[in-house]
Image (tube, grey):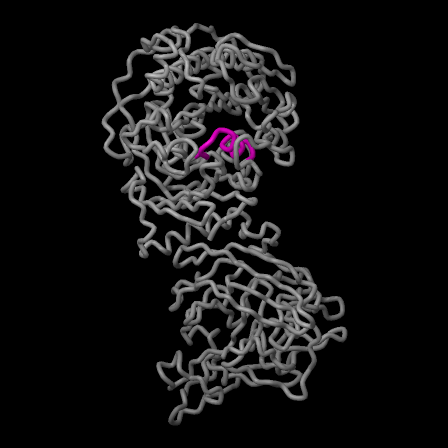
């Protein structure tokens, strides 16, 4: 099941991993980090921030470029780590996330954070993609939605403007104040600085300049602020930072940089840490106490310098393996009550959109593809299931790697653009050196992960124009099946098995018939009746044909086990009868002679057919089908006349339950009723009172209700069937002639 974004775009789906970090996790055999030496003395900046007039927390988001888990002192994936006392202090006073994922490259991660959308939904799936103004950036969203008056600014690396970024691009997509570099820099001491559309050359050290600009802007704010601070460090070019910013004894010669590249890479992280400390020290106690700080890496460590103790070089930045997508994430400060703790929840860079928005006072936990995990910061996450995700994903496209990665708490699937897949148990094999693709016991897990990714990508990535009808309430009242020609997709979960499915339905017109091609997966969750289905639901490959000009026959046709009854507009068939009769076989199956009396009604609870909340279950071949009202597809109230929800095998439309009589809208009434008294109690008879357990418990009384014997009537010259709460629920018989495509044999 390949998930295609554009001609070569594939979604990356990640299964849940457990990262080993200082004091927790499972990241392999890495030894303890070397002791942190005392911090170097940073350039001093006295507190200059202006008192603020509100209590809404300030938000300082710091993004490090190319810093993977093996280059972070807060995790135990390497013994060759940078000295970062300021980030360490944030970790000691806050929360370290062990299972945080980004995309494997800078542009794509920045886009997921600033839009709250996966790359296949924002169009930013590669480097250097262009972020268009059709997406509402996080800063603009907070401005338009939060009740708090937040000032916002972006400092440092932008890299969202495509290959030749316009100096006004940040402003064009809703950034109020921008000061930084539009794309990658080639020299940390000679680079192009753009401030609100004006560009000049800076010959000062990039990490220091970006920090200075942030300090200056923050110091001018009188209301709560959101600062996005994106360092270029430690991204190449590898270089020797100013001596005052790091603690390493390095010469800085080209030969030494080539010979000891990782040491220079780590020195850039140390310089960044020193400047982070200077920024935090510039805040007054009042402002610092009211500020939440989020520190994150934008992707894994580059392959040239990744520590191969736990990661293969091919599993580094630019790959969908753990070394490419696993990143450090530390949150501390205002509102973070969990201090010095580690969190195993699955979170992604995409989730920062909703999390930061909620911190800023926006009353939404789920925005676009983003799920807020704010409540995890001050509560044990086991007490807040809404903040926990069972599955996360990421995606990427490049010349070397195009695919999807998904994970749950234990397993990860990678699906590449050529259709190949890899499966890893990352709870036990974090290094991803043992591919379990041939382990058939994992098939359900793999399918569930793939379905999650496909649903995240609009439900049907191979057909981006498909209409998503997940949990849809239909409104069209046309009885002409040709009015519904389109491709449809939906997302549904088998609740009892905790497996995700994607519905796929296509309705086309061939000559005088509408053709329904369906995989028989509903547009709503299913198997939620308390008792799991006796048969597992599976995708089908069904074809049903509906005449566009149905006609009543001279005589009605009884329902039988030979013909399916109807196809609904979510691609699921109606098959009302059950092959179960009293005293035949085991009572639940084997009663194939339609003339056999005392056939069970699957809708009666005493019949024991284990239907779900939609009056459906699975046949032996895995086909999901309704036995009664689907309790979906139409509004179940008297606010409006019900729409068409499907078509019977004879071509007549099926409406929901509500009709208009004079000026009143009410439920339509069946003309069947329960018989009174006791059933026969002779040989082969069940005895007992008529209570609806058997279809034979009902009798048709002409004129008793609105509908005829087949559960239909003519309104405004159109004959149609109607859903009823009571027997026969959908159809009692066929008024026309069933199409042969509904024949099961």
Magenta stretch secondary structure, dominant? helix
Q: Is residue 562 among the parts visible in the rendering? A: yes
User: Looking at the image, is 710 positioned above or below residue 144?
Assistant: below
Q: Residue 500's spot in the image, x, y percent?
A: 45, 54
Q: Residue 239's spot in the image, x, y percent?
A: 41, 13
Examine the structure image and report whether residue 173 is included in the region drawn in magenta: no
User: Looking at the image, is 232 positioned above or below residue 212?
Assistant: below
Residue in the foreground of this view, choosing between 313 and 343? 313
Q: Residue furthest front?
A: 255
The residue depicted at 44 percent of the width and 23 percent of the height is 64
Q: Is residue 85 among the parts visible in the rendering? A: no
Examine the structure image and report whether residue 104 is included in the region drawn in magenta: yes
User: Which image quadrant is residue 332 in?
Assistant: top left
285 left or right of 728?
left
Q: Residue 68's spot in the image, x, y percent?
A: 38, 28
Residue in the foreground of this view, choosing between 10 and 609? 10
The magenta segment is 102-115
The residue depicted at 61 percent of the width and 54 percent of the height is 467
User: Looking at the image, is 307 positioned above or below residue 456?
Assistant: above
């Amino acid at each position: 099941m390949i998930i295609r974004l554009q001609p070569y775009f594939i979604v990356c789906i990640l299964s849940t991993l457990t990262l080993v970090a200082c004091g927790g996790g499972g990241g392999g055999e890495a030894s303890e980090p070397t002791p942190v030496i005392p911090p170097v003395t940073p350039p001093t900046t006295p507190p200059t921030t202006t008192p603020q007039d509100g209590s809404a927390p300030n938000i300082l988001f710091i993004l490090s470029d190319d810093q993977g888990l093996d280059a972070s002192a807060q995790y135990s994936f390497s013994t060759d780590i940078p000295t970062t006392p300021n980030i360490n202090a944030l970790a000691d006073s806050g929360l370290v996330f062990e299972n945080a994922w980004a995309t494997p490259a800078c542009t794509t991660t920045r886009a997921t954070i600033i839009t709250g959308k996966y790359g296949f939904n924002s169009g930013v799936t590669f480097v250097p993609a262009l972020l268009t103004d059709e997406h509402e950036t996080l800063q603009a969203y907070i401005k338009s939605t939060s009740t708090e008056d937040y000032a916002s600014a972006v400092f440092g690396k932008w890299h969202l403007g495509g290959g030749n970024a316009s100096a006004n691009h940040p402003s064009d997509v809703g950034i109020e104040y921008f000061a930084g570099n539009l794309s990658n820099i080639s020299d940390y001491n000679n680079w192009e600085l753009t401030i609100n559309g004006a560009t000049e050359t800076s010959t000062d050290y990039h990490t220091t300049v970006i920090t200075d600009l942030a300090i200056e802007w923050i110091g001018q704010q009188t209301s709560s602020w959101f600062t996005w601070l994106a360092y270029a460090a430690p991204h190449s070019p590898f270089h020797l930072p100013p001596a005052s910013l790091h603690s390493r004894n390095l010469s800085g010669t080209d030969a030494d940089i080539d010979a000891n590249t990782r040491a220079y890479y780590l020195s850039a992280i140390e310089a960044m840490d020193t400047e982070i400390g200077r920024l935090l020290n510039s805040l007054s106690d009042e402002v610092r106490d009211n500020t939440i700080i989020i520190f994150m890496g934008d992707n894994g460590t580059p392959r040239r310098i990744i520590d191969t103790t736990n990661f293969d070089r091919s599993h580094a930045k630019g790959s969908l393996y753990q070394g490419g997508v696993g990143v450090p994430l530390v949150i501390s400060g205002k509102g973070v009550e969990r201090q010095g703790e580690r969190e195993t929840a699955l979170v992604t860079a995409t989730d920062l959109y909703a999390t930061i928005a909620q911190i800023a006072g926006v009353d939404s936990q789920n925005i676009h593809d983003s799920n807020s995990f704010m409540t995890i910061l001050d509560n044990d996450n086991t007490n807040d299931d809404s903040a926990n995700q069972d599955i996360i994903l990421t995606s990427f496209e490049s010349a070397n790697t195009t695919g999807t990665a998904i994970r749950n708490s234990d397993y990860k699937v990678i699906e590449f653009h050529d259709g190949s897949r890899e499966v890893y148990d990352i709870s036990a094999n974090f290094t991803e050196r043992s591919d379990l693709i041939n382990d058939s016991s994992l098939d359900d897990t793999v399918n569930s992960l793939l379905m999650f990714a496909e649903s995240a990508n609009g439900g049907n990535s191979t057909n981006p124009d498909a209409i998503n009808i997940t949990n849809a309430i239909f409104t069209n009242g046309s009885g002409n099946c040709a009015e519904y020609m389109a491709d449809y997709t939906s997302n549904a979960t088998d609740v009892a098995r905790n497996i995700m499915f994607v519905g796929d339905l296509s309705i086309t017109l061939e000559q005088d018939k509408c053709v329904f091609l369906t995989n028989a997966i509903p547009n709503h969750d299913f198997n939620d009746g308390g008792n799991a289905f006796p048969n597992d639901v599976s995708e089908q490959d069904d074809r049903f044909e509906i005449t566009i000009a149905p006609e009543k026959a001279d005589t009605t046709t009884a329902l039988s086990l030979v013909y399916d009854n109807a196809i609904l507009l979510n691609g699921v068939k109606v098959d009302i009868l059950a092959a179960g009769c009293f005293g035949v076989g085991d009572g639940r199956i084997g009663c194939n002679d339609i003339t056999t009396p005392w056939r069970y009604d699957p809708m009666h609870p005493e019949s024991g057919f284990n239907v779900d909340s939609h009056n459906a279950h699975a046949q032996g071949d895995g086909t999901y089908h309704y036995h009664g009202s689907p309790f979906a597809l139409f509004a179940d109230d008297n606010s409006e006349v019900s729409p068409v929800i499907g078509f019977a095998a004879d071509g007549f439309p099926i409406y929901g339950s509500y009709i208009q009589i004079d000026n009143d809208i009410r439920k339509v009434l069946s003309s069947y009723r329960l018989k009174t008294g006791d059933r026969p109690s002779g040989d082969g008879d069940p005895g007992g009172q008529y209570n609806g357990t058997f279809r034979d418990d009902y009798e048709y009384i002409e004129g008793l209700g609105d509908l005829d014997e087949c559960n239909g009537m003519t309104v405004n010259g159109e004959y149609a069937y109607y859903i009823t709460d009571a027997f026969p629920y959908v159809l009692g018989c066929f008024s026309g002639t069933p199409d042969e495509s509904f024949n099961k044999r």
